[in-house]
Each structure stands twice: as structure tokens, then as C-alpha cells.
Image (cartoon, coloured by chain):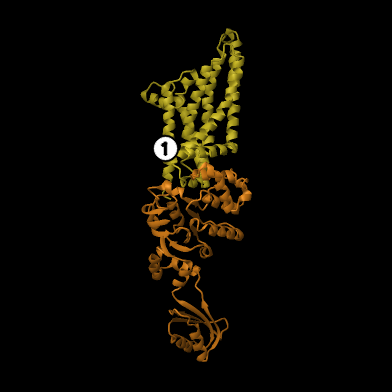
Chain colours: A yellow, B orange
Amino acid sequence: MKNIIAIYRRELGSYFVSPIAYAVTGIFLLVSGFFFYIILSNLVQRSMMPEQFGGQQGLDVSGTVVRNFFDVASQIILFMLPMLTMGVYAEDRKRGTMELLMTSPISELQIVAGKYLASLTLFVAMLAPTMIYHLAMGVYSEPALPWKIVLCGYLGLFLLGAALVAIGTFISSLTERQIIAGVATFAAFLLLLVLNIAVRDSTTTFGEIIGYLSLLSHFDDFAKGVIDTTAVIFYSSLVAVALFLTQRSLDSMRWRKA
Amino acid sequence: MIEVDHLTKNFGKVRAVDDVSFSVGRGEILGFLGPNGAGKTTTMRILTGYLPATSGSARIAGFDIFEQSIDVRRHIGYLPETPPLYPEMAVRPYLEFVARIKGVASADLGIRVNQALHLANVEDKAGTLIKHLSRGYRQRVGIAQAIVHNPDVVILDEPTVGLDPKQIIEVRNLIKGLAGDHTIILSTHILPEVSMTCDRVVIINKGRIVAVDTPANLTTQLKGAERIQLEVGADPESLRSALMQIEGVTDVRIEPADSTERLSVTVESQSDGDIRSEIAKRVVGDGFDLYELRAVRVSLEDIFLQLTTEEQPAAAEAAPAAATA
């Protein structure tokens, strides 16, 4: 446990002095804030307009904003997280510090756990400021802002992000070059996105299976305020599998042919 | 403290470490000498628990390196060829981190880190970011992380490579200062380093151990022949027959010296004793002009080259006998 904490602290400290973490967080907040604004102003306008011009009087603006925001946010993190996770193992391997970790009296599991928790913490830190958007909206909201839906949405976002970070970290452990890890992770996430869109209205069994695997499809319910336990289990299992594979990947470094 | 038993490591078809056996006593400094690619780094990586061996075993501080790897790692400090540094960290936090993952208790953290800073002579850089340190300082921080948890065994892979002469001397003194309290294995392809710092030397080539002994013994024992160089004014044939008559002389090589009149003569002898006086008396007594007479000292460098470029039956005999010295 001590070892996990030691590694966690080091990794987190490293994130805080690295420009990448700030750049990614900054861009994420900028983009998500912008989208929030766009969604909000769009819906406000629609709710003000009389029916014949395409308006919707009596629209639950804040509820709709919340749902749309989470939908958009889930896609934004798909693009941003590869940047955060690409260096987690690749940099250590390149710098030779992997050898330090692997020749110390710590288990690979502890290494994986410590690093993962640090990345997860950074993800939460990146996500947290977006709560301000909802708070600001909530002050003027009529009817009142559905807080349960907001919290539900964040839970979904957290679980989705946890899974994405786990996958991205695993990919990072496969290579020494950050760029390759970043591109591969990005491609993987992009595939996930396309997958979701492609099978959204599918009727074939194959389509349904693929649809089930799509990370984003499980997220939809959270945005609507529904906590689906199958989705929670889905994301948690994904995290567990990715972490397990990462540990195997570390172990395999000892058995390299070169 | 360290017992290595028929260690072998294959990478696919390539045998990087071939049946390596040796032992190191407590407080000893053992040198690992060999050309690049000889298997030094691979052997060290096996001992430190980074790689598993294909066959064979080793025990460090009584623990088996494969069965009790975590225990072994607690007792080892390791400095790889590239120091495992985090550039964005300052020296002290870095050493604290290493101390923690090596199992140092929180209460002892401060003391241990300070001691390591002091021994490695990097106290004045404790607050500096590692990326701002010069090569020499980085190397010393690397040594500091290897000793911060006060391990029984310290394994250093080419600790002086890339340093300037002054830094090299500092690092060597540092290493010598560590001996006694710690058992040290250091690998190098710099020959003087071995004779200056090590108690014993293992010469390794192409994965196999070629010789194990103290630097002094290697120099005398593997000299094989004593070689004497002469500059003589004489007729080659009569000089040769005169010299060959001396007891113990095995070979005489005669070439013209720079000045055409004189001859440059190399005499190889088997004798344990010093036959220089015999040669002098003979040369002068037979009426030749003796201009120069000296013994050619065989250096560790010659031995190293000799051992790593051809098979030496004497060395092969000496190796198992000295392996457990």
C-alpha cells in the first residue's frame, strides 16, 4: 500500500509540473465551456420563440442543456484523454526509469495501481471545474435544475473516463514512443465513436453485439439520469481488464527477446 | 554475500550469458571487465531481478534471485548504464521517492536521504531540478539512489562512462569509500579503473568468464613469459646462439633497430627468476655492445586483449581455481 501511495504521489506531482496536463485541461475546459454556452443559448432562444417560428414554449431548458452537455462532453473526453495517458509508461520506458521500478521491491500490480490512480485523479481534476457551468445555470434556472441528473451524468462521465484512461494507459505500456501510444489510443477511441454512431439504430444481432461493446452506448442512460447497474459493471470490468493487461505487459518486458 | 551458479541467458538463439559462475564476499569490490557486448549488463540485470535467467541460479544475501526476487531487491542498489532519473524532479524528492519504493521506513527517510546526499557528494544540489544538473552530478545522483536504502549489495553498470577525468576520480573514490560497508559489483571496459578500485576482477567475453582473480595476480600469473628487450650492437647469428644458450630462454627475436648498426632484440623466457643479469653478463662477456636492457611489463591491457582475442589454456586453469577465492 505504501508503495502504491509513493508511486501515486510521484506521478501526480509529475503531472502538475508537466505542460501537457495543463494544456489538455485548459483546452478541455475551453471547448466544453464553449459547447455549454452554445447549447444553452440555443435552447434559451428556442424556448423564447413563439411556436410558429420553430420555438418550443415551456421547454425544460436546464434539463435539456444538462443532457446535451453530457452527450457532448463524453465525446470531447474521447479526444482529450489520449494526450493524458500516452506518456504514462512510454516515458518511463524511454528514460530508463522503468528499470528502476522493476528492480525495486515493489510488485507490478502496485506500479499499475499507483500510476492508474494518478491518471484518474488528473481526469477528475480536469472534469471538476465543469460543475461551475451547471451551478451558474442553476442559479437562474426555472424550473429548478435537476441536480440528480447532473450528478448522474458526472457519474457516467467518471466511469467512461475511468475506462478510457485504463485503455489508454494499457496502450502506453506497449511502446517506448509516446507518439505511437498517443496515436494508437486516439485511433482506438475514434473507432469507439464511429462504432457507436454506426450501430445506433441497428437491427441485426451482430450490430447489437457491437453496439453493446461500444463504450458510448452505455453512457447514454447516465446522461438521461438513469443509473444502469449493467453499465456500471461494464465500465468497471473494462477497467479491471485493462489494468490486468497492463500488468501483463509490464511482466512481458522482462521476457523480451532483445 | 553473492553466489552465482551456472547462470545462462538466451535471447532467442543468442546466448548472452554462458554458464557464468562466481562469488563475491561481504565488503568486496568485484570488477566485471569485458568488451562491449560481453554480457556484463545482462548479468547485472539478472542479478537485480529485471530479467529472468534461462538457467542457473544465484543467491544474494541468502535469497534466491528468482524465488525470492522481492527480498533480493530490498538488499540491492542498482545503477544502470543510464541513470534512472526523473528530470522534472528535484534531487531530494527524487531520492525520497526511491527510498520509499526501496522499502525505507518513513521515520528513517530523512536520515537516509541526507546520508546518501552526503556520501554521493551532491548535498549542495539537493534542491536543484535533475534536468538542470551536469552529467557528472547526474551520475552522482544515480549513485546516491543506489545507496539511499543502505543496501548490502551495490551493483554499478559502467559508473564512470561519459565523465571527465576529474569526475572519474571523484566517482572512483566514492566507490572505494563505499566498500567494506557494502559489497560492490562494478562493470567497466576501462582497464585502469579495475586495477585501481577492485579487489578482484572477472573478465568476461562473449558471455563466458575468461578469468577471475585479483588484478595483481592476473598481471603476474598470466604474464606467462617474462619478456626482455635489448638493444645490442652485434652480428645477429652469433648473438642469437649466445642468447639461446642461456638457461630459461625460450625465444629470441632479432630485428634491425632504428640505427642500422644495432639490433633490437626481444628475449622470451620461462624462468621465474630475473634473467636480466645473466643476459647482461653473456652479451658483454661475449664481446657484444650492450646499449639497452629492460624488462617489458605486461599490463592488464595486454592480458585483457590476450584473453579476449584468443584462448589461453593457462587462464582456463586459473579461472576455476580462483573463482571461489
Query: What residue is shown at x 54% (from left), y 35% (from top)?
Result: A84
**Left or right position of A256 against B106:** left
Image quadrant of residue A59? top right
Quarter of the figure that contains the C terminus of chain B: bottom left
Task: Return the chain for callout 1.
Answer: A
Quarter of the figure that contains the N terminus of chain B: bottom left
**Left or right position of A205 against B215:** left
**Left or right position of A212 against A57:** left
Q: Against A178, is A139 above or below?
A: above
Query: What residue is shown at x 58% (from left), y 57% (from top)?
Result: B163
Query: What residue is shown at x 50% (from left), y 29% (from top)?
Result: A161
Label 1 residue SS: helix
Q: Position of residue B132 (x, y in %)?
A: 62, 47
Image quadrant of residue A19? top right
Which residue is label 1 attached to? A245
**Closer-to-camera residue (A135/A32):** A135
Q: Position of residue B236 (x, y in %)?
A: 49, 87
Query: What residue is shown at x 56% (from left), y 45% (from top)?
Result: B110
Can residue A213 be seen here? yes
Q: Against A133, is B107 above or below?
A: below
Q: Position of residue A27 (x, y in %)?
A: 59, 30
Instruction: Look at label 1 and name its amino acid.
Output: Leu
